[in-house]
Amino acid sequence: MDLDAFGELLTPHGQRALAEAAELTGTDPVAAATRLRRTYDAALTSAALTQAALRERARAKFGADAAVMYFTPHGLEQSTRREVADHRARRMGGARVIDACCGIGGDLLALARAGCEVDAVDLDPLTVAVATANADALGLADRVRVRAGDAAQVRPEEYDALFADPARRSGKGRTFDPMAYSPPWPVVLDLVARAPRACLKVAPGIPYEFIPDGAEAEWVSWKGEVKEATLWTGPEDGPADGTDLARRATLLPGGHTLTATGVQAPVGPMGRYVYEPDGAAIRAHLVGEVAEMIDGRLADPMIAYITADEPRHTPWAAGYEVDEVMPFSLKKLRAALRERRIGNVTIKKRASAVDIERLRTDLRLSGENSVVIILTRILDKPSVIICNPISPA
């Protein structure tokens, strides 16, 4: 879809094509295209069918808003889930914000809903048009101004806050190297240095050495899946002394937040229960804080499985009652599962080289029962934990 085709899509003629395309979503694509071509030209037919399909995919991130929004494939892929964007926007307050690389506008919409006045910039004219259309479709055009431009040329010092979500894809696909972001990391850091306050959306696996000194790094998990990391800088963020990295994990939709206290988890023998901390807590190096919360300890000092003697219920960790712990051996594990009549296993692993799908085949499961098996290392020895989820509180 090019800029001209998107502009046509916004006309009354294009809106009729889009409505018809939406009714054909899920049907045979060739038949759908043939039907639309009876009324519309090839460019508008393609744009309408593409947009209808993207709206359907976007429901998972944007809910009911997706039905009236516009997307590009890349823009939808990089967009933040609405609930996560809303969480971040609430932290920004009612500031005047410059969004330095706005994409299709998911975050600027959340900021506008939270009361912010948003100026937004993106290099791609099509993306700018999509973001502008989204603000208009959701009744937020009076709070948002979008223009084509280079993020490196914005002046964050003229605003209360900077928001930036640098693109994390190159011509070869997704990139995990901040130096390959667009704009590149040095440009982003220059913008941050000039902003009174900044909020950066980055990949959850960002290496710690790329995080600016004095920043707060927040990892956000949505229903148990780590979605992103956000770096916050400014007078309201970061550690009290401004010399170290503040770490925070946040769980959505519950809104639970955990911050670093410096506690170290003790190491001790495997107990009756084992806990898997949420990925946001692991990324934020808050395993010690979770262990303290459930009166637990690490069975291995280098691996983020916590063990305890009593059952505990916390949103910060999934708990399992241990049935058996054994050194890893395919033959012995197969025999143990056969004895328990296990026909279905959930396999988890950490610090294990075992191929999960190959193991699932090699176990030759047969039976009516289910179990969880955890492949890990305990005091540097390959081990397997046979366990079952703790019943809800």
Image (cartoon, rainbow, N blue to C red):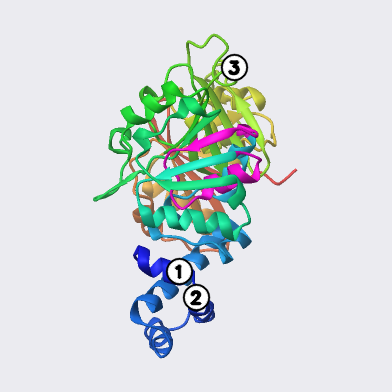
The residue that disc 1 covers is: 51
Q: Quadrant of the N terminus?
A: bottom left
Quarter-of-image position of residue 264: top right
Q: Residue furthest right?
A: 393
Q: Which amino acid is tagged 2?
A: Leu
Q: Which mark's residue is nearer the viewer, 3 or 2?
A: 2
Please say whether residue 14 is visible from this viewpoint: yes
Image height of 330 relative to 286, above or below:
below
Which label is found at residue 261? 3
Q: Quadrant of the C terminus?
A: top right
- Residue 144: image x %, image y %? 55, 46
Density class for disc 3 (Cα within 10 Å; few <14, some 14-19, many ≥20) is few
In magenta stretch: residue 100 = yes
First-in-chain label (3 vs 2)? 2
Give the residue displayed 34% in from the left and 45% down from the top.
354
Total numbered badges shown on the rendered structure = 3
Q: Which amino acid is tagged 3?
A: Thr
Image height of 282 relative to 19, above or below:
above
**What whole-number distance in Å separates the C-alpha atoms at marks 3 and 2?**
53 Å
The boundaries of the magenta stretch are 91-116
Near-viewer residue (232 or 140): 140
Q: Mark 1 near mark 2, Cβ–Cβ under 8 Å? A: yes
